[in-house]
Amino acid sequence: MLAMVREEARDWVGAVALYQQAAKAGNLAALAPLARLRERAGDLTGAKAFYQQAADAGLLDALIDLARLREQTEDQLGAEAIRRFGLDANGDPAAPW
C-alpha cells in the first residue's frame, strides 16, 4: 500500500491522505493506521474515533488498541470492560452479559 511507503518516508500528511482515501474506497483496514498516526500526533480523541470505526468494521486488533488507549487516559475500568466484553452498540465498553 502506497500509504505505508509514505509513512515510512515520514510523510505524515501524504500517508494520512492515502489511508483516508483507502478507507473511503472500502479498505477498512486503513482505519487502524489512521488511528495510530492520530495517536502519535497526540490527538487521542481522533485516534479513539478511528479505532472505534475499525472495531465496528470487525478489526479485532482495534479493540485491543482502543483498550490500551483507554488505559493511557486513566480509564482502567473501561479498558478492562473492552478486553472482557467488547463494545456495546453505542461504542461504549459493554457490560457483563
Image: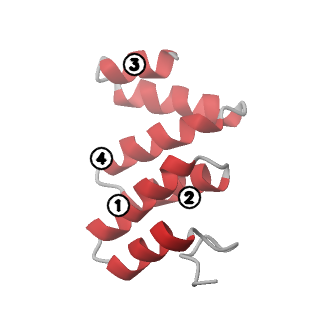
* Nearer-N-terminus badge (1/4): 4
Residue at coordinates 59% horizontally, 70% vertically from top-left?
87
Residue at coordinates 30% horizontally, 47% vertically from top-left?
41
| Within-10-Å neighbours for mark 2: few <14, some 14–19, many 20+ | many
Instruction: Name the amino acid, label 3.
Output: Arg
Foreground mark, 4 or 2?
2
Residue 6 is tagged as 3
The residue singled out by tag 2 in the image is 52
Which sits in the foreground, 82 or 36? 82
Percent x, y for residue 8? 32, 20
Foreground mark, 3 or 1?
1
Percent x, y for residue 29? 58, 36
Percent x, y for residue 90? 66, 74
Residue at coordinates 63% horizontally, 35% vertically from top-left?
23
Instruction: Name the amino acid, label 4.
Output: Ala
- Gap in angstroms between the C-alphas marked 3 and 2: 24 Å
Foreground mark, 1 or 4?
1
- Gap in angstroms between the C-alphas marked 1 and 4: 16 Å
Label 1 sits on a secondary structure element that is: helix
- Gap in angstroms between the C-alphas marked 4 and 3: 16 Å
- Gap in angstroms between the C-alphas marked 3 and 1: 26 Å
Instruction: Name the amino acid, label 2.
Output: Gln
* Nearer-N-terminus badge (1/2): 2
Instruction: Name the amino acid, label 1.
Output: Arg
Q: Is residue 73 left or right of residue 87?
A: left
* Nearer-N-terminus badge (4/3): 3
Residue 43 is tagged as none
